[in-house]
Amino acid sequence: MIRLSAKSRYAVSALMHLAMHRDAGAVPLAEVSVCQGISMSYIDQIFWRLRRAHLVQGTPGPGGGYRLGREPDAISIGEVIALMDSDGSRQRRGSPLDNALWGELTERIDGFLRGITLADFVTRPQIREAILRQYSGRQWRCDVCGGLATRRHPPASEAGG
């Protein structure tokens, strides 16, 4: 099984949060921190990298926060993972067989992940359901005023829309 770094998983979750709330305006980092269960110091590190890569744009001041730097269908999961997991170090050298095997496998996995975008997930009913469950009893962004509020999990009849 392939394991992704915590930083990659958190970055994808944070960007998914922005994608889900993109019609509500700029999203404060505090909201992302609370809703995604990521410490503020860690989310600051993640957004520093995301800003440098132009995957997010910041809006300063009251009512400020972050928005996606591009449309959700133009941000691939693979791009985010590659950004977060790049540390500038070179991979260690292995045998020719090792390099051929893992090199090809890595290319296939990278290609697969680069073919999946944030938009692919935002439109999935199971992702929307997970978002609604996640906000149950927690803070979320009010679609009307843009402030943080508490929303209860809606009845099943409301969860589909």
Image (cartoon, rainbow, N blue to C red):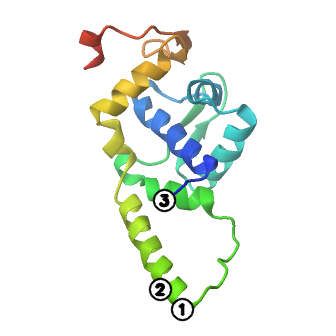
- The amino acid pointed to by label 3 is Glu
Q: Position of residue 150 (x, y in %)?
A: 53, 9
Instruction: Describe the element under mark 2 as helix, strand or loop.
Output: helix
Image: 97 above or below 74: below
Q: Distance between the residues labelled 1 and 2?
A: 6 Å
Give the secondary structure at mark 1: helix
Farthest-out residue, bottom: 96
Q: Residue 96 carries which label?
A: 1
Label placed on residue 25: none
Residue 148 vs 42, above or below: the answer is above
Residues packed near mark 3 inside 10 Å, few (<14), some (14 to 19) or many (20 plus): some
Residue topped by disc 2? 100
* Earlier-in-chain disc, 1 versus 3: 3
Marks 3 and 2 sit apart, C-alpha to C-alpha, by 23 Å
Residue 158 in the image, given as x and y percentages of width and height: 27, 12
For marks 1 and 3, give the one nearer the viewer: 1
**Circle 1 crowding by C-alpha within 10 Å: few under 14, some 14–19, many from 20:** few
